């Protein structure tokens, strides 16, 4: 029997980025398929947006970050500041989620209205195998995870204290969270 999970994705860092990104996500586990649908509105326009679910490998319940997580009080919640409440980046919603290759250029791109819709059927057995290799368990525990959508224009002025650089190619503009939501069983 299929199991459905949903998330209402709410804005994060909207004052710093000038737009209140929001949307919905739906995950349906059916047999060996995880069907993922994510639709976002009011994201920064005409750019790629990384999106993932985050969580704790040991199974602790993850929660979405809020401005309360702005530990250094610079006006933005950056990726490192989300980790105490949300855990680590786990599964990307890119061209090949089951490969769990986080830094890449195959994430959705918003249109000139700041909208995008991501839809993907993922082989659950392949995803669970890679998840187990990475995190030591094959239980995705979606209802203990949160979704994050990331990405602001490279020319947006961010405080020097903003963290989240993964490499020289992927700086804190790529990883800055713009929206987040708790995943729950439907």
Image (spheres, helix red, strand yellow):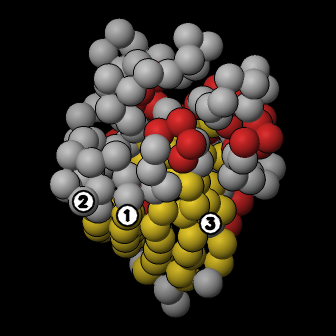
Quadrant in the picture for residue 116 = bottom left
Depth check: give the residue in front, 168 or 123. 168
Position in image of residue 55 (x %, y %)? 66, 46
Please indicate, yes or no, whether residue 133 appears anywhere in the rendered image. Answer: no
Label 2–label 1 contact, CB within 8 A: yes
Depth check: give the residue in front, 122 or 152. 152
Count residues near mark 1 (Cα–Cα under 10 Å), then give few for <14, some for 14-19, many for 20+: many
Residue that numbered label 1 is attached to: 41
Residue that numbered label 3 is attached to: 183
**Is tag 2's residue or tag 1's residue first in the polypeptide sequence?**
1
Quadrant in the picture for residue 184 = bottom right
Left or right: 171 in relation to 154: right
Quarter of the picture holding the C terminus: bottom right
Count residues near mark 3 (Cα–Cα under 10 Å), then give few for <14, some for 14-19, many for 20+: many
Report how many numbered discs are placed on residues in the image: 3
Count residues near mark 2 (Cα–Cα under 10 Å), then give few for <14, some for 14-19, many for 20+: few
Q: Residue at x 57, y 70 (%)?
A: 8
Residue that numbered label 2 is attached to: 113
Q: Residue at x 46, y 67 (%)?
A: 23
Position in image of residue 91 (x %, y %)? 47, 46
Nearest to the eye among marks 1 and 3: give it: 1
């Amino acid at each position: 029997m299929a199991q459905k999970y949903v998330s209402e994705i709410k804005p994060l860092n909207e004052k710093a980025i000038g737009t209140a990104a929001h949307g919905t996500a739906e995950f349906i586990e059916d047999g060996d398929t995880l069907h993922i649908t994510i639709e976002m509105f009011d994201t920064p326009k005409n750019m790629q947006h990384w999106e993932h679910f985050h969580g704790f490998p040991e199974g602790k319940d993850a929660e979405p970050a809020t401005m309360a997580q702005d530990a250094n009080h610079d006006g933005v919640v950056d990726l490192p500041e989300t980790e105490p409440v949300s855990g680590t980046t786990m599964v990307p919603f890119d061209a090949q989620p089951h490969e769990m290759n986080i830094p890449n250029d195959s994430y959705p791109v918003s249109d000139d209205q700041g909208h995008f819709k991501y839809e993907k059927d993922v082989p659950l057995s392949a995803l669970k195998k890679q998840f187990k290799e990475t995190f030591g368990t094959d239980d995705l525990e979606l209802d203990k995870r949160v979704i994050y959508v990331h990405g602001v224009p490279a020319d947006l002025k961010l405080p020097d204290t903003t963290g989240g650089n993964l490499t020289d190619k992927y700086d804190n503009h790529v990883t800055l969270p713009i929206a987040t939501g708790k995943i729950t069983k439907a």
